[in-house]
Image: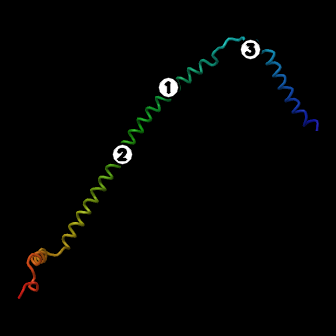
Amino acid sequence: MSFEIILPIALVLSLTGIAFLILRKKSEIASLPEREYFPKTRKFIKREKQKVNLYLKEKSARWENILQKLLLRARIVFLRADNKILSLTQRLKQKKEKKSPDKYWKNIKTSLRKNPSQKDRPA
């Protein structure tokens, strides 16, 4: 049971010790001049950001080229499909014209429509 109390007591004592040291040295810490910590790392980070930006610009240019190629290929596919559909509709139109009655019968029908039939004529 005493072992369960030791850990919290040690924690509280260490935190109060840290607080005591900080409060005691507070005036000395405040009087220190401000300085730049890690100046080399800032230059490093700046240089790396430039490299990343350059890489992203190159990558975006590559993506634009790939996208352009894909769009051109898609356009070719759609134009081929459109051409195929056009040829199929022309074939259907030709088949329909072949199946239609001969011109002879068309001429008879038109002549009958122009001239009244004998039933309609007075006798």
Earlier residue among tags 2 and 3: 3
Q: Residue 86: x percent and y percent?
A: 26, 59
Quadrant assignment, res 25:
top right
Q: How is the image coloured?
A: rainbow
- Residue at point 72% right, 11% down? 31
Q: Identify which residue, 121 or 95, lies in the foreground.
A: 121
- Residue denoted by label 2: 71
Q: Which amino acid, mark 1?
A: Gln
- Residue denoted by label 1: 50
Position of residue 52 in the picture relative to residue 29 (left or right): left
Label 3 crowding class (10 Å Cα cut-off): few <14, some 14-19, many 20+?
A: few
- Residue at point 60% right, 17% down? 39
User: In the structure shown, which secondary structural element does the residue marked by tag 1 occupy?
Assistant: helix
User: In the structure shown, which secondary structural element does the residue marked by tag 2 occupy?
Assistant: helix
Position of residue 96 in the picture relative to residue 75 (left or right): left
- Residue denoted by label 3: 29
Q: Residue 51: x percent and y percent?
A: 49, 27
- Residue at point 10% right, 84% down? 120
Image quadrant where one finds the C terminus:
bottom left
- Residue at point 44% right, 32% down? 57
Q: Is residue 50 above or below residue 99?
A: above
Q: Which amino acid, mark 3?
A: Ile
Q: Which amino acid, mark 2?
A: Leu
Q: CA distance from mark 1 to mark 2?
A: 31 Å
Q: Residue furthest bottom?
A: 123
